[in-house]
Amino acid sequence: MASIAIAAAGYIINDYFDINIDLVNKPDKIIINKYISRRWALFWHLFLSLTGIVLSIIVSNAINNWLIAIINIVCVVLLWYYSTTYKRQLLIGNILISALTAWVIMVMLMAEFPNWVLNNSVNTTIEQITVVRLSRIAVLYAAFSFILSLIREAVKDLEDVPGDLKEGCKTMPIVWGAQAAKVFVGVWLVVLLATLVITIVYAFLLNWYLAAVYLMLLVFAPLVWLFKKLLKSRIVADYAALSKHIKWIMLSGILSMIMVYFYTK
């Protein structure tokens, strides 16, 4: 809930500072100044940010791990600077958002096993085996989240070139050109596909057949389709379609956690 509140606050403040850009890129989807005033947008940003921080403090106090609260407070600050500055700079904003997305996964590992994460200490052999297994899974999901978010941020930059150019942003397609940005996305797609191949093979070796088939059909195949469509994309509408497709892949990846739960419980 803390992560959801902080992320929601980040979306609000991003829309707040992106009004002029959105008027060019997506005038039909503007919320602020159309359905809600700028003052109320700031209020909800502040309220949700404080809610996320308070919830983080409650969790940190309960498990005696204050690193979670500290990092989540840093996340709130970084999301503010992302909206005001970093997203308009080359690569910095892309990497920051991708890292924050991965943190949503890693914070759960820290909350579940604070002693092991901070001190590398566990109580029993069974607990150690559980921690090691879930740690590997968490790192794998975090890496997947980071790379896929990095891909989507780059695709969004390609989609948002008209408005970003008008506002003087220095995003990847503006500085390097659209073709170089597409190469960047393509390289990370290849990395992600290679990682998925290894994961699927590993799942078969563990006899996680349903999980392996799920990943092949609902994650790997859509990523291959995405790669092919990327090569043919030329206009804003093409990149908008790719961005929506990536959202569905993200959802498929998240839902795969259900099978991990049943295979590891």
Image (cartoon, rainbow, N blue to C red):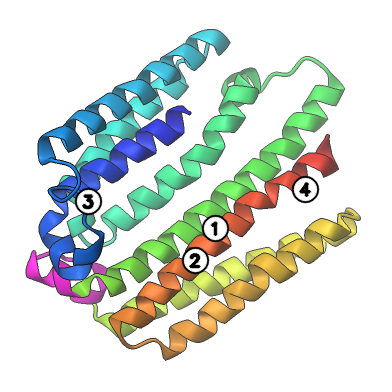
Identify the magenta region.
162-174
Pointers 1 and 2 in contact (C-beta within 8 Å): yes
Secondary element under disc 4, as helix, strand or loop, is: helix
Q: Secondary structure at mark 3?
A: loop
User: Magenta stretch containing residue 49, yes or no?
Assistant: no
Residue at the far front in the pictured view: 35
Counting residues from the start of the chain, the first of labels 1 and 4 encountered is 1
Separation of disc 1 and disc 4 at Cα?
16 Å
Q: Indicate the position of residue 56 as horizontal and vertical percent values.
A: 43, 20
Q: Are marks 1 and 3 in contact (CB under 8 Å)?
A: no
Distance between the alpha carbons at the discs numbered 3 and 2: 23 Å
Please name the residue that numbered disc 1 is placed on.
250
User: What residue is pinned by disc 3?
Assistant: 31
Label 4 near label 1: C-beta < 8 Å?
no
Instruction: Provide the residue designation for mark 4.
Output: 259
| Residue hosting label 2 | 246
Q: Quadrant of the C terminus?
A: top right
Which numbered mark, 3 or 2, is in the foreground of this view? Answer: 3
How far across and how far down the image is residue 230, in percent?
A: 45, 82
Q: Are marks 2 and 4 in contact (CB under 8 Å)?
A: no
Q: Amino acid at mark 2?
A: Ile
Mark 2 falls on what kind of element? helix
